[in-house]
Image (cartoon, rainbow, N blue to C red):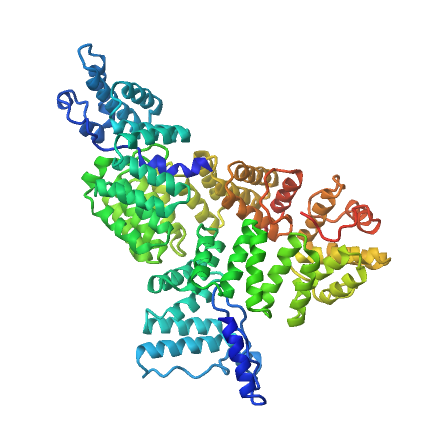
Amino acid sequence: MSFWMNRLCAVAAVLTAGLLVAPCFAYDRLGTAGPIRSFGGGACTVDFPARMRGECDSPPVDSTLPPERRSQERVERARRLISVIRVEQAVHELDEAIADDPLNRSALLLRGRLKIPGKLEEAIRDVDQVLRIGPEDSDAWATRAYILSGLNKNGSLPDATKALAINPQNVDALWIRATILTRMGSLAEAEQDLNSAIALEPDNPGTLLSRAQIRMQIGKTAEARNDATAVLAIRRDRSALQIRAIVEAISGDYAGALDDLNAILDSPKDQPVAVPVGRDFVELYVQRALAFARTGKPAEAKRDLDTIVRFGGARAVLQLQLYLRNHGFTDVKLDGARSDQLDDALQACFIDDACGRGISIPG
Amino acid sequence: MIRRSLSRLLLMAGVVGAGPAASFATEAAAGCSLAQVEMLPDTVTEPCSKIINEKATSPAERGYALFIRGKGYHNTKRFDLARQDYDDAIVLTPTNEELFVSRANIAFRGGRFEEGVSFLQRALALNPSNGHALRTMGSLLADSGQREEANRYYSMALGADRSDAYALLSRSQNYAKLRRFDEALKDADDLVAIAPSDINRQGYLDERGDHIDFHVVALKNRADVYNAIGQFDRAEQNLNDAVAYSRSAPSLAARGKFLAYKTGREKEALSDLDEAIALGSVDSEAYYAKGIVHLKFNTFQDALVAFDGAVKIDPWFVSALRMRARVHRELDQTDLAVADMTQAVARGIGAGRTAALRDTMSALSRAGYWRSSDNPTDLTPALEDAIRACMLDKRCN
């Protein structure tokens, strides 16, 4: 499908050269299956509060239209609402669309996909209904595969495979099956699916990033770096920067690693302006501390470690303690509290190089 | 893994219906009959023993009496005695195919999988159309993930006997797992439509070997299907019907478990679950659901008691161990929390239960305490450390 879309875009570009203002997307911005690829992107010039008041919403659907047509118009309006990040309103519009025409598969599928974040059980009911109405709907099979995988239920791989049997060029289905295969540990097969997806749609940052992550896991670091660079050519992406930094550090290019890490983190100072949250917090600062240490900047390295301990909370301290205990400092207490013993171990491990030369925190 | 995967087999062949050898003249007089064992299994021992011990009894009659007495033992949870009788009966009546199906069930209950399969094969060799053997084959296939093929066997079993309640129940559940809910519902409807007196002649033994009212099981199954397709009112109506039909531990536990996971219904859930437990419920999932409700109410001590009950009934209940660990953590009982979570992970690894393990490992991974994307195969010091870190961190869920 993407191939034909590309061709159509090319033809349209020639015919209307100079007239087009909006870019011609090679793919559906929302994607066709699984989670919505990207929210927003619609033209809306008002500020955020005005947007939330609905000032960018498109006009309501004409209630005098026949039910089936009205239902489809509501789906189109829901898509426009998603493009101005009015998701709740989009779901409401789809509720109405389904009330108008309970057999409207596109309404059911889109509503199901919108419910994937946080309402998987409701999402799968919508998708099941789509499959009852249209058992050959590749996107619905792929979406159900994704949801089943999220619910830790059996059947996700067969569903994804069925989606691809119906439409081998379903890019989202390829990505979904790759995700499932990755979870199952079948990384080579996952990479194959992503290769196919990227061949069909080379400018999709999601699939490129997924492939970079898989390639890191299977040791294809140079290829992973290329994928990460390709992602960064499309958009700023912290995960891509992190992957590239790790590859650079592995190959001894600590200056390059520092460049990428500095693009993610604030420069070392007493208090970080923006503290990355989640498991990345410790990992990123540790990586940069190591890069600083390797490039002869122990003071900066120490400041980064200090940032972890001072601003990361008990969880960050626990992560550091685990890391140290796994790297020979088995007497470091595992309690989530800062201590002189911890500070000494950090100094020895990271600044004095007692933990070896790996930049990433291994499992 | 085997323990869990056999559960369907255990349910399936607890009791089997009349076999070809059912027309013995001595049956009615002696009270050693299929009809008797179906209705009152604990009453056949004495009359059957009399026939077995009578010197003049022919080998065929003795074999049949052993079969009936074995079924009596079988249906009253005396599985070793049942096995002895079945084995003795097989020597005397080697063409009684039902005997082999029952004997297979005893093997499955004892965890002797291959032995069970071999008895099943012998039953099918005697009669390839034996419905009870076919449905058990279906269960074997379903447990190994071959659900479509399993349905073929269930359908063949139903071809032999349209009112085979086990086959209907298993096919309904199997369809639901395949997310073919229309078919699941149709079988569920057919199952509920069987008159309670008829369906209970087929008997239903749960995986512990306890006798459960089959009509309650049928209503609960239909509720499960409605629940899966989001028709919660209908699901609840079926469970209400089950309670109205038989206000018992199984029916109340079923409704309590349903309500426990419905927002705003927790108090009603608790009432049902408490009553089920007071009536002697040994349903570990009922205790678990009660623990979940107490967690929602932040009544941690009560939750602890409930999860404790679940683990006592089923020491392999990994989710209950995990939840008990979390309650210990809430109560700042770190060492107890670590012990429970470690045990949960060890059991998950030991039994190869990747789904149960995945939840724990996901929590450890999200918190940044575990970096590998693979499930562990050993309880290493690094993993023990990660578990302790998680049990020190109340947001590690």
- List the single residue furthest toward the right: A296
- A156 relative position to B332: left or right: left
Residue B64 falls in image quadrant: top left
- B304 relative position to B385: left or right: left
- B121 relative position to A249: left or right: left
Q: Position of residue A335 (x, y in %)?
A: 69, 45
Using the rendered image of the protein, determine whether residue B216 is visible from the camera's viewpoint. no
Q: Residue at x 65, y 67 (%)?
A: A231
From this view, report whether residue A248 is shown above or below residue A54: above
Camera-nearest residue between A21 and B380: A21
Camera-nearest residue between B121 and B391: B121
Q: Residue at x 45, y 61 (%)?
A: A143
Q: Position of residue A17 (x, y in %)?
A: 57, 88
Camera-nearest residue between B32 and B336: B32
Using the rendered image of the protein, determine whether residue B159 is visible from the camera's viewpoint. yes
Camera-nearest residue between A227 and B56: A227
Q: How many marks?
A: 0
From this view, report whether residue B167 is shown above or below residue B106: below
Q: Position of residue B111 (x, y in %)?
A: 42, 30
Q: Position of residue B281 (x, y in %)?
A: 35, 37
- List the single residue furthest toward the bottom: A19
- B8 relative position to A293: left or right: left
Residue A22 falls in image quadrant: bottom right
From this view, report whether residue B314 is shown above or below residue A26: above
